[in-house]
Image (cartoon, rainbow, N blue to C red):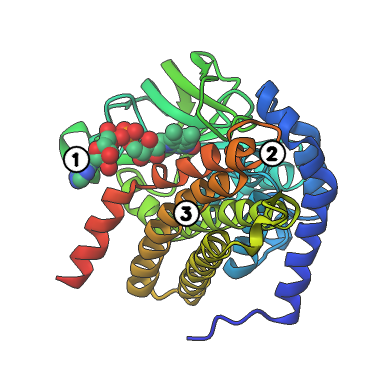
Amino acid sequence: MAFSLSDEHRAIRQAVREFGENEIVPVAREHDEQKKYPEAIRKKAAQFDFVAPNIPLEYGGAGMDKLSSVLVTEELWRADPGIGSAVGSAGFGTDMIIEFGSEWMKEEWLPKIAAGESASASAISEPAHGSNVAGIETRAEKDGDEYILNGNKMWITNGTVADVAVVMAKTDPDAGHRGITAFLVPTDVDGLTADKIDNKLGIRASDLAELRLSDVRISEENVIGEVNEGFYQLMEFFASGRTNVAAQAVGAGQGALDAALDYAGEREQFGKPISEFQAISHKLAEMATNVEAARSLVYRAATAVEEGDQDLASRFSSMAKLFASERSVEVADEAIQVHGGAGYVSDHPVERYYRDARITKIYEGTSEIQKTIIAKQLL
Ligand SMILES: Cc1cc2nc3c(=O)[nH]c(=O)nc-3n(C[C@H](O)[C@H](O)[C@H](O)COP(=O)(O)OP(=O)(O)OC[C@H]3O[C@@H](n4cnc5c(N)ncnc54)[C@H](O)[C@@H]3O)c2cc1C
């Protein structure tokens, strides 16, 4: 299994890096402090195909392979995880539409999302059910040629900015994971409200909300894929989603490392740069090694996803997510240490990377869940 970067991959990485340095880094702190959703940056990123790079060419997207998508995510997060999250999540749920959606759904929504005009959301989690997806309680009851949806969806990225959401609901409540169906729900439909969650620890430029569905009427034409097959459809994207989050973690870790390297070269104590103290240089060496090891796992996972090898993709994506997210938080913590007191305040970006990296241990399956998946494959 090869996972070296082609010239095209390197060109994509360089293009996103330049975009990040020019368009994101200068405004990152302001967006974090003001919890400001970066709609203008999302629109600009779309001009360069950095929003939803997975969308096929025929629907206005870039049709990038998985490794390219991962490079986009990594570089957006390296520039700033908050804005990187907002830009990179603008197409949440589109994998489901691309793979299982009807033609009209693709034609109506994918070009708008790829162009940065719309954002989408993926609504799976609920107040009482996060790790246990099969336990969701949102109900979709058939009424003629419509479904009536009732329930609450919790922690939904893009909840107040999305124009459309892929909502998972129970169509057969007694059948556990065999009774879940995916619905395409435009967010301006009657009965759907979004309550913004704006007290997040990190990725504060990214939008988050609780969605309430109260007698939301949706045509049966809005079923994505097959009735009662939603859980299995969702499972097809777990490896891809986890690889993305692992790439987010690598980006945050690299951003924190970059800042620590700069500071260690500039800051002087006892008449010399602190980078000349072995305690600091060894710290930097360990941080760089952890970021690079995480990156290798992520690229390996991306290659397995691209090659369609389900077992390898599942194993490597869980390993990549577990390792990259845990190490990223540690690297950001050490980056604060390298900065001393200056690392503890928002004048430098390292406290932000620390807060932002923390989410990668939680969403798309917590670290504990990743360990369970990996162990199941081993035993
Ligand atoms: C910023 C943010 C963005 C998010 N975006 C989205 C989104 O766009 N769409 C969406 O649907 N969801 C989203 N989520 C939800 C996220 O996926 C869940 O928070 C996550 O899956 C964990 O679920 P939970 O919060 O209910 O925790 P719980 O499942 O209640 O877990 C609590 C603790 O128990 C542990 N635990 C649970 N079950 C087990 C087990 N079987 N074995 C061992 N340990 C276990 C967990 O690891 C964790 O430590 C987002 C969350 C956040 C914070």
State the separation of the CA atoms marked 2 and 1: 48 Å
Q: Is mark 2 within 8 Å of ligand 1?
A: no
Of residues 55 and 75, the one drawn nearer to the viewer in this rendering: 75
Q: Quadrant of the C terminus?
A: bottom left
Closer to the N terminus: mark 2 or mark 1? Answer: 1
Q: Quadrant of residue 16?
A: bottom right
Can I make out residue 147 in this image? no
User: Mark 1 — residue?
Assistant: 176
Q: Nearer the viewer, mark 2 or mark 3?
A: 2
Closer to the N terminus: mark 3 or mark 1? Answer: 1
Residue 290 image label: none
User: Mark 2 — residue?
Assistant: 348
- What residue type is disc 3 on? Gly
State the separation of the CA atoms marked 2 and 3: 30 Å
Q: Secondary structure at mark 2?
A: loop
State the separation of the CA atoms marked 3 and 1: 23 Å
For this view, does 139 lie left or right of residue 193?
left
Tell me if mark 2 has few (under 14), some (14-19) or many (20+) residues whose alpha carbon lies within 10 angstroms of its own.
Answer: some
Please provide percent x and percent y for residue 286: 49, 65
Classify 349 as above or below 208.
below
For this view, does 260 lie left or right of residue 176?
right
Can I make out residue 81 in this image? yes
- Dots 3, 1 in contact, CB < 8 A: no
For this view, does 83 lie left or right of residue 94?
right
User: Mark 3 — residue?
Assistant: 241
- What residue type is disc 1 on? Gly
Of residues 135 and 364, the one drawn nearer to the viewer in this rendering: 364
Residue at image coords 49%, 13%: 191
- Dots 2, 1 in contact, CB < 8 A: no
Of residues 111 and 43, the one drawn nearer to the viewer in this rendering: 43
Please provide percent x and percent y for residue 34: 69, 21
